[in-house]
Amino acid sequence: MTYFEKAGERMYEFTGKIFPYTRSLTGQGVRDTLKDIEEYISVPFENEDGTTTDKGSMPKLKIADIPSGTTVFDWTVPKEWVIREAYIEDEEGNHIIDMKVNNLHVLGYSAPVDEWVDLEKLKQHVFVEEGQPEVIPYVTSYYKERFGFCMSRNQLDSLKPGRYHMYVDSEFIDGNLNYAEVIIPGESDREIMFTTYFCHPSMANNECSGLALQSELIRYVAAMPKRKYTYRFVFNPETIGAIAYLSNGNNLEYLQKNLEAGFVLSCVGDNNDYSIIESKYADTIADKALKCVLKYRGSYSTYNFHFRGSDERQYNSPGVDLPVVCYCRSKFGEFPEYHTSADNMSYVSAEGYQGSFEVMTELITAFEKNGYYRMKVLCEPQLGKRGLYSNISRKGTYDGIMLQRDVISYADGRNNLFDMSERFDVPVSEILQVTDKLIAADLMEVD
Amino acid sequence: MTYFEKAGERMYEFTGKIFPYTRSLTGQGVRDTLKDIEEYISVPFENEDGTTTDKGSMPKLKIADIPSGTTVFDWTVPKEWVIREAYIEDEEGNHIIDMKVNNLHVLGYSAPVDEWVDLEKLKQHVFVEEGQPEVIPYVTSYYKERFGFCMSRNQLDSLKPGRYHMYVDSEFIDGNLNYAEVIIPGESDREIMFTTYFCHPSMANNECSGLALQSELIRYVAAMPKRKYTYRFVFNPETIGAIAYLSNGNNLEYLQKNLEAGFVLSCVGDNNDYSIIESKYADTIADKALKCVLKYRGSYSTYNFHFRGSDERQYNSPGVDLPVVCYCRSKFGEFPEYHTSADNMSYVSAEGYQGSFEVMTELITAFEKNGYYRMKVLCEPQLGKRGLYSNISRKGTYDGIMLQRDVISYADGRNNLFDMSERFDVPVSEILQVTDKLIAADLMEVD
Amino acid sequence: MTYFEKAGERMYEFTGKIFPYTRSLTGQGVRDTLKDIEEYISVPFENEDGTTTDKGSMPKLKIADIPSGTTVFDWTVPKEWVIREAYIEDEEGNHIIDMKVNNLHVLGYSAPVDEWVDLEKLKQHVFVEEGQPEVIPYVTSYYKERFGFCMSRNQLDSLKPGRYHMYVDSEFIDGNLNYAEVIIPGESDREIMFTTYFCHPSMANNECSGLALQSELIRYVAAMPKRKYTYRFVFNPETIGAIAYLSNGNNLEYLQKNLEAGFVLSCVGDNNDYSIIESKYADTIADKALKCVLKYRGSYSTYNFHFRGSDERQYNSPGVDLPVVCYCRSKFGEFPEYHTSADNMSYVSAEGYQGSFEVMTELITAFEKNGYYRMKVLCEPQLGKRGLYSNISRKGTYDGIMLQRDVISYADGRNNLFDMSERFDVPVSEILQVTDKLIAADLMEVD
């Protein structure tokens, strides 16, 4: 197994490491996560050509601090949430739930509380997931101050009448919202962007998986011997983080000028079918390219933009209008484990990760090779004299070279790699085999 | 019931009043009809805000006289037809048919005759409707001079051999072709046009219904507290009247410059499914808007331009090319009562009229509110702080506000109200609820 | 029967005459064929108007000589192949195959050989068609020197062990590649092009049929009393001949400037369903026009450009990009007789030819009449006064003139004959009846 054939295992392992942190829009959990990512992407490794990509040569994670209260477009960066302890205690002193056991037990951005109440009163502050009685739901209240807890419907039903101690030791302080980015330059200013989010506590697929995949992709891209495109990797809390990112400096204008295609990574570690959420008008090269890759990996689902939910929302918003789609395996909101305690380490797998990694690296390869193809000779070239065509002519002998003939015919400057893949109904990898040969024979150019 | 909820009843009653007149391309029946319309539109009524819209404030019907012999594009205005009496008398002096009983009994534009003939000869001048033996057909001969009568197949079959007196007292005189218009100005010179025709004698749906609906719409528009668009209402004899209208003065050039959308009203008083006849290329805002309204009123039929038949023919003709569609309930030519004595007061109803009135006023409301929507903030706005979004975030809570989110995303200056209705598959009224809120919150603008 | 109703019989007869020649990319067989074509097109005949189109007035075939070794775009013109004799002899002196019996027995462009070998060795130089044991396949080796023979699988299996004499008396000389053209001028420099090929030995449908049809079309076009378009007819060996043609002088630039539509004629003499192979993007007037004609001749097959195979390959290649489609009855490669000895005189017929001739002459008529139609009056014209409309108006009477009404409405300068045929779903001939009447009435113009 080559180094990157083991990417799935590494990502799965890394997921286990960052899974326990209590991430939210802001706070220490976020910073702990970013620190681990920084470490992960800088582990030295041996390239296929025998050279070693070491710490020194790896790109650094650039972390931004956006202070609480900062206006980011229509939004205001909230105070930082400090959460120290959260539990419900019964009369015998048992912690019937405790965020030390599962950090989903505390409402995200819960205000502090320290109060004994009876069962009826307690229930007003507990969220459960009706219909999934065994799971703890994930609930937040970022923009309205309230306190609260989450537990399973079964556990709530089992509570006996009596007195309960609601305890949350939290604080809202003037702090920072963080996002981080890695930019790996290529020959061109044109960019391919990947982006994922870190604002969910212990959930594996809908959070950690995007972080793991994106970190591994950074390693992969950094190790590429040369790059046509510049690669941008953005980590941010969902929604307000993407908004803060776009509103900062000239990020928006720069991306509007230079972004070729962008991909939001979300829920990428399970081993179910692949999914794409299209861009607003489903008409960008990001849509076309990802579909060309997914088409040859078994069945996949296409969701139109109505079904969006992650940061593709911001990237496609009016006035932003960037060519960004969202990539998932099981799409968020469509699997029952979503936003519950069941989205844990058993929902993701090394195999699931490896599949996503292959999709994304195949996509990168395709973009690196992509361009508008153009023949350098008029009429069909004489392929026989170059060994690219059978030298005997009889019924059937040209069957094996039909694709080559099709590629030549449509290499008229109007079709790129993805157009050809779509038109001829063959994987980009097969088109590339043909174009590589024709370019090597000096019969074709690409721009 | 508010005033306009009783529109259907008023229109039905008005239909009964104008039904008996012997209308044709020209003549006294036409002028009697226009006089009644003028009276109808100027009846005072109380507005919802308590003010009274009275006679003085109502727009006047402007009636044009186009003299016989006038060239209107490729046509010549015919002589005016004066019809005084028409019957067939048997040997006993019985009037076996008489236009006093039903004015369909005389061929439209019949020449005079006063002659006793035998039954065989009589039959050469009588039109019946084969296949509908009980109805009197409606037949005209505008541009070739002949005399004739219409009766039911059953009545013709029942005639005994004998002598019959064919009597038509008619005359062709140098007179006028009339049309009429009402223009109600709005803030803009851009116009919404409604047009209908008056050239058929006693038929209820295919004639009177358009006149009644258009008259009621004049009242409705005149009573609107303000208007973005200017509204034009045209009444004319079909075909040559529309041609005369377009050829007169600078009507054509003015409409080509200012017409936003036009609607021919034909057969609008029955209570069957709705219909639209598309414009020539089915690509105008009139097509899209009317379909967006009809879609949510139960099933409706779309006829392409091949099935045209009323004045949409002239408005879509080469060199005219105006954005005009035709609106019907049962489409002319598609119901058996069409162009026969069975198209009488029992074929139309107050309910049928009320449905058409609602379609048209919903259409007017949509146009008044329509525009290309554009967000005034970059990225998604923070809706929670404005009470436009749930302040708790958990699975499912955003379902009810998906439409708002979609409207925001597509408010990028490329989509108008009808585009959104079509794209999101929801009625314009629901889109308007969202856009009204967003405009009120100063988050959106429309132009 | 008129003269051109007998075209099918003449073409069938002519096919019999040129069938036996041993054609190849180059050589005497080609020149013999061209000589017969020249003679065929110059036979005098009587026109419908009684005049005679005689030899003197017929266009001449202009034959080009392209010397061996000439570079034509990416290709080099090969040496000329001189083939004098070819057979396999057994020990008893029997010629078990001989090209005198069937010229498919010798591999096209076979090198010379004169050698006694045993059966095993012989088999290495014999091509058969697996799966069709009774036919001799057609095989060539133009660009790699080898010798060889073709025979039926059954005959090869029947050979007894023993010694065999492989004998080919051939030679490669510095000679010429030939092509020929006829240009018949019209009022305009805009051109309609027909092209077919002559490089196959004795096969009837996939070779001779195109030559026969194109020769007859030359006679037809030459006899037309006047021509709007200039007509170009090209005869060449397939692939390299078309390349040589396009690379010669300013042929390519001239065609890019002046070609309205081009048609490759291939396999046009059988009596099966019709076929079209579309142009590269299926978007030229050649595609639309041929489909409009084929649609009304029973069922026909549409092959997209992936299924191309004849000189439409060169005409649609990048940088050439001419509006050229291919016309067939049974498409090459799709009938079992293709490229075998079974493609003989029994596979083609006078009826099959006559069908192709009618398709092509109907196409020519359509192009001659084609243009963008435009009404000369505003609104609908008054057809009644010109006898183009019933002068009595009642239900049903306008049914017969709906097409006329549709033609008028779409004569707005945006639709040509083929657009109308497609839109109204009626044959071009019916549209032409209407447009001829309207033009005669000075109501319409065409440009």
Image (cartoon, coloured by chain):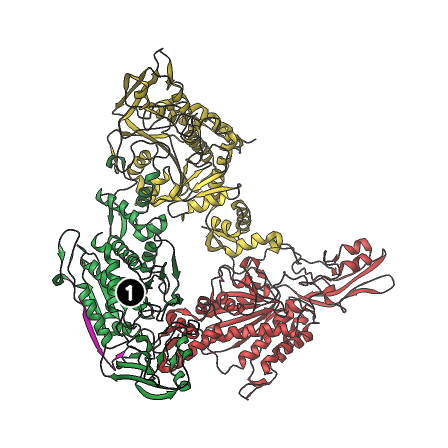
Chain colours: A green, B red, C yellow
Assess whether residue A65 is covered by the magenta stretch.
yes
Mark 1, Cα crowd under 10 Å, few <14 / some 14-19 / many 20+, is: many
Q: Is residue A28 above or below residue B279?
A: below
Which of the 4 quarters of the picture holds residue C149?
top left
Which of the 4 quarters of the picture holds residue C121?
top left
Identify which residue, B374 or B406, lies in the foreground. B406
Assess whether residue A424 is covered by the magenta stretch.
no
How far across and down, in percent of the image, does residue B296 sit?
Answer: 53, 69
Q: Is residue C259 above or below residue C29?
A: below
How far across and down, in percent of the image, does residue C13 sit?
Answer: 48, 25
Answer with left or right where residue C284 lies relative to residue C445. Answer: left
How far across and down, in percent of the image, does residue C132 sit?
Answer: 43, 28
List the residue tagged with mark 1: A209
Q: How many marks?
A: 1
Answer with left or right where residue A183 lies relative to residue A295. Answer: left
Q: Is residue B138 above or below residue C39?
A: below
Residue A258 visible in the current orientation: no
How far across and down, in percent of the image, does residue B432 sit?
Answer: 45, 76
Image quadrant occupied by the N terminus of chain B: bottom right
- For the residue marked with disc 1, what is the amino acid? Ser
User: Residue placed farthest to the top in the image?
Assistant: C92
Identify which residue, A54 or C432, lies in the foreground. A54
Answer with left or right where residue A109 lies relative to residue B287. Answer: left
Q: For the magenta stretch, what is the residue range?
A: A58-71
Residue A12 visible in the current orientation: yes
Identify which residue, A236 or B36, lies in the foreground. A236
Secondary structure under the numbered disc 1 in the rendered image? helix
